Image (spheres, rainbow, N blue to C red):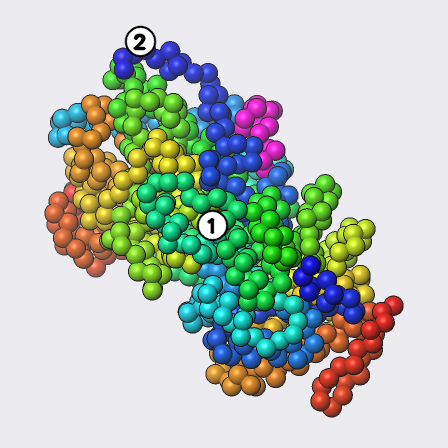
Amino acid sequence: MSSDTTPDGERDGDGHADSRARADGKFGRYGGQYVPEALMPAIEELTDAYERYVLENEGGFMDEFRSRLADFGGRPTPLQRADRLSERYDREVYLKREDLLHGGAHKLNNALGQVLLAKYMGKERIVAETGAGQHGTATAMAAAHLDLPCEIYMGERDTRRQRPNVFRMRINGAEVNPVTTGRGTLKEAISETMRDWATNVEDTHYVIGSVVGPHPFPAMVRDFQSVISEEAREQVQEKAGRLPDSVVACAGGGSNTMGAFAEFVGDEGTDLVAVEAGGSSLDVDEEAGVAPNSASLSTGSEGVLHGARTKLLQDRDGQIMESHSVSSGLDYAGVGPELAHLVDEGRVRAVNVDDDAALEGFHRLSQEEGIIPALETAHAFAHLHEHPEELGEVVVVNVSGRGDKDLETVLEETEQREVSNAPDLSVLSGGLGGAHGAGDADADARGGDE
Amino acid sequence: MSRIPEAFEGGPAFVPYLAVGDPDYESSKQYVEALARGGADVIELGLPFSEPIAEGPTIQGAVVRSLSGGMTPERFFEFVAELDVDVPLVCMTYYNLIYRYGGSEARRASEASGEAASEEADRPRAFVERAKEVGIDGFVVPDLPAEEADPLREACDEFDLDLVFIVAPTTQGERLERIMSQVSGYVYVQARLGVTGARDDVSGQTDESLGRLSQWDVPKAVGFGIKTGEQAERIVRGGADGIIVGSALVDIVAEGAADGEDAEVVADRLEAKARELKTGAMRGAGVETEEEDDGQEVPNPERT
């Protein structure tokens, strides 16, 4: 496709809002509103606010949102040509640099949108769950910026895996509540935040962190995140002179994925590739209720969890499995209903890479492009590495976040297994003693960037 | 018509809840039977789901104990079939277990081959059919609001089972009318916002909710937070037709499990607690009960 065939590249400013969810919040057979009755009035209120403020720009809501995203968040983020990866894979590889958004990940797009919406709705308190801590830190920043009190629920295990983000949330003034039920990861954090919301629903807004949950969350979060593809679609046409052959993004719950895909869904010549966490294996242990991966699109089955019908990792009875990924942010047993629908329709291709490949991808991008990616993001680069030939001549990869938060995990995991391209980290053995202490010790492991 | 409505005819109904299989299959059976002896009019039997988003810490604990003891939907149905109690039984569970039940092998095969999965209505039907077979009278599904309930309600209608809806303090106006037009069996009046769990006080939200519901004829059972006979009395006096008690009973099970006590001892304690709650509810309706030495109540069926 050449640039002169892209009149619809000039979409109007709110082309984000074609609301592919039907009025009842269904994407094909997925989606819906499976929540306790106590929450339904709040969900009706939120649906009304979403339609008025987000879809209709009532009170100039979307204008204020975009303006704050620019001034507070630093948008637009660049689309950068990756010179060495382009050379290595013999095709044009472009990086959508969401790692450069304030806070270091795409998460602020959604968090800022929802906290602002809560303000328009007259809510007085914010709660949110977080997995890797990126959504928690983004929500804490947005809440501080817009002056609303904020409480974050985070799996106890994740608070240990992601200490730097716990610090950041606290420093921005948020309460952080460790969740000890289950395995103490994202799934439990979402359940616990829903319980808080059900208790305090009258004055509290739940800023859900991904395109999951009951309608209108999946559609609304997609709309806030679709600024990624809105920008990328214009930028790639400027830089490459045409639309990309493929857009690649990692997928856990799927918010960066839907954000990176949304504006390309209508471009039939552009393949959309969602890269899931294959973890240590795609096999499941039904007896133990453990799926050592987080690949719900690739291996999951249809079910109902956290307010929506979608694809889930579950046992034969419908009990939800414990998922696994080396990256906390992908470690979830479900996925957004719209993504499940787009995969069923054949519009999005779901692939997965394992933990080892993700770690190699992490080191490769760090060494060859000077960008330390989040471990979540590293999955997308691992897929690029494994199957560049499937991605066409012009490829956009969404750099959903930066990897500072993961340095401790990378150090541990690199020590525990053979990662072929890892630098010698022995100078750091015994831990980083603080996530930002690595700076001068070893140029290859440089971590602190603030 | 199920047996549930008549359970509310003889005075205020006491509706206890326990998670089936907590802390193990055999003890759990003794506990349910003890509740029946203690005066239960309807019993809610919890089929544990791994993500119980409407439950507080007490019932979350029960879910963990039951699931780690190997509870499954099929074991649950066997349990119900073996129970020796004479009151209506309501299955309380989350929608995914109903949705996934039965024919899962065939369904997975069709999903894997990319065919459209079976018709929506077939999904809850298998679960409801099996529940009917073992003697279940109705369902409460905390994560299934009226908007999503059509397939389950159709299956319930087909097998003459009741589908109990929850009405929250936030349920008002047109929404309340819509739900009340779909209720069967009884309406579960959620006494307060939040999650399940025993409390020391009775929420003022209860009276307001009961006031809003007074125009409907269906029995109103109040749950969430009740733990003593005095609270039961007060709630019945406020207009409730029944009380639902879960966490206060599960607490007794949890303590027994933690202390490694004999199931008989724990069962006796549950029976005594049940009697306290039932008696409190009767007092609320202006009915004094006499406790005989053998613990049998003699309720006066005439209510004020």
Q: Amino acid at mark 1?
A: Leu
Disc 2, SS: helix
Q: Chain of mark 1?
A: A
Q: Is residue A372 above or below residue A186?
A: above
Report the front residue among A147 and B134: B134
Q: What segment is highlighted magenta in the picture?
A: A46-60
Report the front residue among A121 and A172: A121
Disc 1, SS: strand
Residue shown at the point (31%, 30%) measured from the top left = A272
The extreme top residue here reads A4
Q: Is there a contact, CB below 8 Å, between mark 2 and mark 1? A: no
Judging by the rendered image, the residue that carries numbered circle 2 is A4
Q: Position of residue A223 (x, y in %)?
A: 46, 30
In the picture, the disc for residue A439 is none
Q: Amino acid at mark 2?
A: Asp
Q: Position of residue A246 (x, y in %)?
A: 27, 27
Whether residue A77 is visible here, answered yes or no, is yes
| Secondary structure character of the magenta stretch overall | helix
Judging by the rendered image, the residue that carries numbered circle 1 is A305
Q: Is residue B221 above or below residue A301?
A: below
